[in-house]
Image (cartoon, rainbow, N blue to C red):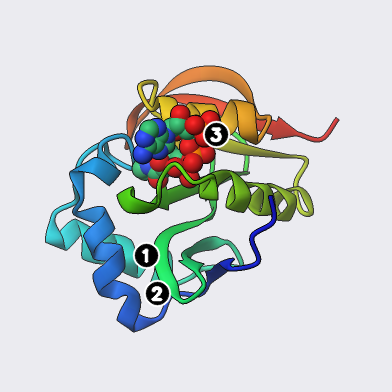
Amino acid sequence: MNRLELSLRPFKLEDNIFVKSLLKSYEVMKFALVNRVLTDEEAETFIKDHFISKPDTYGLKVLCLQEELIGFAGLLRCRYLGSDDLELGFIIDSKHQGKGYAAEIGKILICQALSDRNRVLALVHPDNTNCRKVLSEKLKMTKDQEIITPDRGARQVYIYALK
Ligand SMILES: CC(C)(COP(=O)(O)OP(=O)(O)OC[C@H]1O[C@@H](n2cnc3c(N)ncnc32)[C@H](O)[C@@H]1OP(=O)(O)O)[C@@H](O)C(=O)NCCC(=O)NCCS
């Protein structure tokens, strides 16, 4: 699949309302980040930390279908397995789920990560069957281990590694 209309672009201040609406949606957030909707304060901090003050070339971008905002995704630095890794993440608005967009953007992010590292991680809530399906079947990532993270609770770690 190659949909030319799907793209990641840097956050603009006017995207704030849309990103906040995702962070405040139970349907979207039940298995993402801290497994619940964020408070107003948490949402503002999240947006500031991940979209506004970007420490390096990695980070989150907004996901657009042509001009329409449909989610956000990106690569985040992490140390969940004890070394300096990149973690792939995506959050798609409910009305745009089930259309293959996460896999499409995930492939691009995996390629980007592997141009700099020899592996990329994804962390998924054990009950998030939709996301597990994307990671294992569509992105061909391998389930590695289950960990308890200090910030997000139980997560299955999936890895795509260069051979
Ligand atoms: C999990 C998520 C990223 C998957 O993205 P997506 O673009 O919807 O993924 P897909 O379209 O490939 O769907 C994956 C599977 O989920 C299921 N699914 C997704 N949406 C569905 C819907 N509306 N109805 C029924 N099944 C659905 C299907 O089994 C689908 O597999 P199929 O395409 O073989 O039928 C997305 O649903 C999402 O953002 N969820 C909320 C946030 C989240 O959990 N993020 C991931 C954190 S690790």
Report which residue position mark 1 lands on.
49
What secondary structure is marked by label 1?
A: helix
Question: How far separated are the C-alphas under marks 2 and 3?
Answer: 28 Å
> Does residue 81 appear to the left or right of 12 in the view shown?
right
At horizontal 68% and vertical 54% (from top left) the residue drawn is 108
Q: Judge depth for marks 1 and 3 and give the one in front.
A: 3
Q: Which quadrant holds residue 135?
A: top right
Q: Tell which circle, 2 or 3, labels the residue nearer the N-terminal end.
A: 2
Within 10 Å of disc 1 (Cα), the crowding (few <14, some 14-19, many 20+) is some
Q: Is residue 13 above or below residue 85?
A: below
Badge 3 amino acid: Val
Mark 2 sits on what residue? 52
- Identity of the amino acid at label 2? Ile
Q: Secondary structure at mark 2?
A: helix
* Vertical order, 78 against 41 (above or below): above
Residue 87 seen in the figure: yes
Q: Alpha-carbon neighbours of circle 3 within 10 Å: few (<14), some, or many (≥20)? A: some
Q: Which residue is mark 3?
A: 134
Give coordinates of residue 54: x percent, y percent.
48, 70
**Within-10-Å neighbours for mark 2: few <14, some 14–19, many 20+:** some
Q: At x 54% / y 45%, what residue is drawn? A: 100
